[in-house]
Amino acid sequence: MKFCNLLFSIIILLTLISCSQKDEKVSIIKEKDLEMQMIEAYNEGLKEYKKGDIFFAAKKFNEVELLYPQSIWAPRSALMAAYIFYSDFYFNDAIFELERFLEKYKNHPNTDYAYYLIAICHYNLIVDEKRDLGEIIKSKKYFNILIKNYPNTDFAEDAQYKLQLIEEILASKELYLANYYLQREKWIPAMNRYKKIVNEYDTTIFIEEALFRLVELNFKLGLVEEAKKYTVLLGYNYQSSEWYNRSYEILNKNYKKRTINDNQSKNRESIIKKFKKLFQ
């Protein structure tokens, strides 16, 4: 009887071991099968992208992310989906994918690239600086994040250049509005816009006209000393400019131009910093 009980126990143990091994084997097969699906979907996405079917390609890359969310290929696939939309000028679709990537994969090694690409997408959506202020602000925001958090990357270097272009765009918008008020003889709103260019966009190409208009407006309003101060600013930095010559003509021929030597020219600083005392 004892022998029968022992034999029965051994049979049950062997059965359990056999079932355990079978379950483990099935699990491995399923995992490998899922990985193969992921690789096939990724390769199919690349194939369709090369053929030019970007929407189907993006769909396949999204499938990779869904099939294998814990894989290193999941975030790569999300970035690929964004990139193919960007490469075919579907910037809004690319932005959607990139926003999702930045939310889902916060610490991914390619986060700097994602910030750069989303900033470029918003930058490319700027069509008219007079109306597309939202896109201008968003692109500036992401470029600044890139420069602050990833300063030693190639992306940050290009971001610096793009920010300079954005400053030019913003300054041109202010100049457009200032000239609009000037043409309608709304002197104070016009003056405030020109001052904003001088205070915030003093490295742009629009600074010369803004300074001249401030000379012109102040003189028109009887504020001759203020007009002279802005002429000094214009003359010190842009003495060969036609805007300086025009401001000189407004004041009168007895007003002496300020001359500068080569050393002063080489070492000049920001306009506002250099002449801040004139406005205190």
Image (cartoon, rainbow, N blue to C red):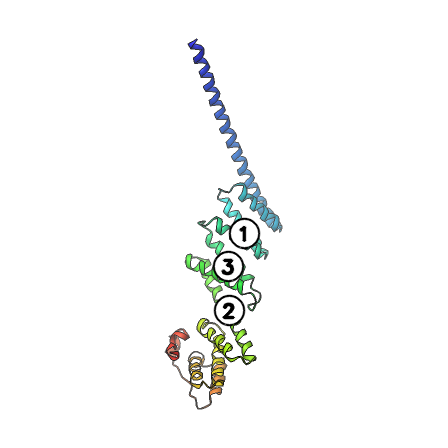
Residue 252 spot, x, y in % from top left: 47, 89
Residue at the spot 53% in from the left edge and 60% down from the top edge: 122
Residue 119 spot, x, y in % from top left: 50, 59
- Farthest top residue in view: 1
Which residue in the protein does label 2 denote? 170
Quarter holding the C terminus is bottom left
Q: Give the label, 2 or 3, closer to the camera.
A: 2
Residue at the spot 54% in from the left edge and 35% down from the top edge: 33
Answer above or below: position of 35 versus 151: above
Marker disc for residue 195: none
**Which amino acid is tagged 3?**
Ala
Answer above or below: position of 56 versus 232: above
Residue 245 visible, this angle: no
Dot 3 crowding, Cα within 10 Å, few <14, some 14–19, many 20+: many
Left or right of 196? Residue 63 is: right
Give the Cα separation between the discs numbered 3 and 1. Answer: 13 Å
CB atoms at circles 1 and 2 under 8 Å apart?
no
Which residue in the protein does label 3 denote? 119
Dot 2 crowding, Cα within 10 Å, few <14, some 14–19, many 20+: many
**Between discs 2 and 3, the one toward the N terminus:** 3
**Between discs 3 and 1, the one toward the N terminus:** 1
Answer above or below: position of 213 versus 123: below
Give the Cα separation between the discs numbered 2 and 3. Answer: 16 Å
In the structure shown, which secondary structural element does the residue marked by tag 3 occupy?
helix
In the structure shown, which secondary structural element does the residue marked by tag 1 occupy?
helix
**Which amino acid is tagged 1?**
Glu
Residue 60 spot, x, y in % from top left: 58, 45
**Between discs 1 and 2, the one toward the N terminus:** 1
Marker disc for residue 97: 1
**Which amino acid is tagged 2?**
Leu
